[in-house]
Image: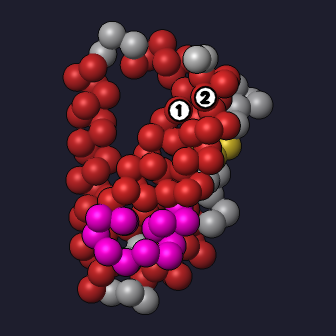
Amino acid sequence: MTLAELAPWAALGAALGVALLLTRSSLGERAAGTGLVGVGAVVVALHAEPRLADVVTGRPLLVAVVALVGVAVLLGLGTLVSSRLWLVPIAALAVAWLRLPVGGDADAPKLLLPLSAVIAVAP
């Protein structure tokens, strides 16, 4: 199965993960939602920008370090937000307009990664 065939299913899985993050409060369900969003985002990013696949191929240590740092940041932000719930809507409004380009081209796809991070850490 190629990335082009897998990307729509990964996006659907990521959307399901966002739905879990928005509607569920148990730790297990939220962890599953975060995992679905993460896996879906990686597959869609690799499909949208093939040069990313070239960067990570043969560098499992780089991928592991980036994944661990990302999880640590999300856990830290989740801890901060859980004691200050009023930050969630403010943070969502602050980053809703941010679209980060994936790749260096002028026509590179622009993803809502900061908003996805806010949704991932919201209780």
**Residue at 30% across, 39% down:** 67
Q: Label 1: which residue?
A: 43
| Residues marked 1 and 2 touching at CB (< 8 Å) | yes
Compared to residue 7, the image places residue 114 above or below, namely below
Compared to residue 109, the image places residue 17 above or below, namely below
Q: Is 69 displayed left or right of 111 in the figure?
A: left
The stretch in magenta equals 18-30
Give, as a three-letter code, the residue at label 1: Val
Image mark for residue 93: none
Compared to residue 59, the image places residue 25 above or below, namely below
Q: Label 2: which residue?
A: 6
Q: Is 19 displayed left or right of 97 in the figure?
A: left
Which residue is situated farthest in the right direction here? Answer: 107
Give, as a three-letter code, the residue at label 2: Leu
**Residue at 50% across, 57% down:** 17
**Residue at 62% across, 47% down:** 12
Instruction: Give whichever of 29, 35 is nearer the camera.
Output: 29
In this orientation, does residue 14 appear?
A: yes
Disc 1 packing (10 Å; few <14; some 14–19; many ≥20):
many
**Can you say which quadrant of the picture contains the C terminus?**
bottom left
Compared to residue 17, the image places residue 93 above or below, namely below
SS class, disc 2: helix
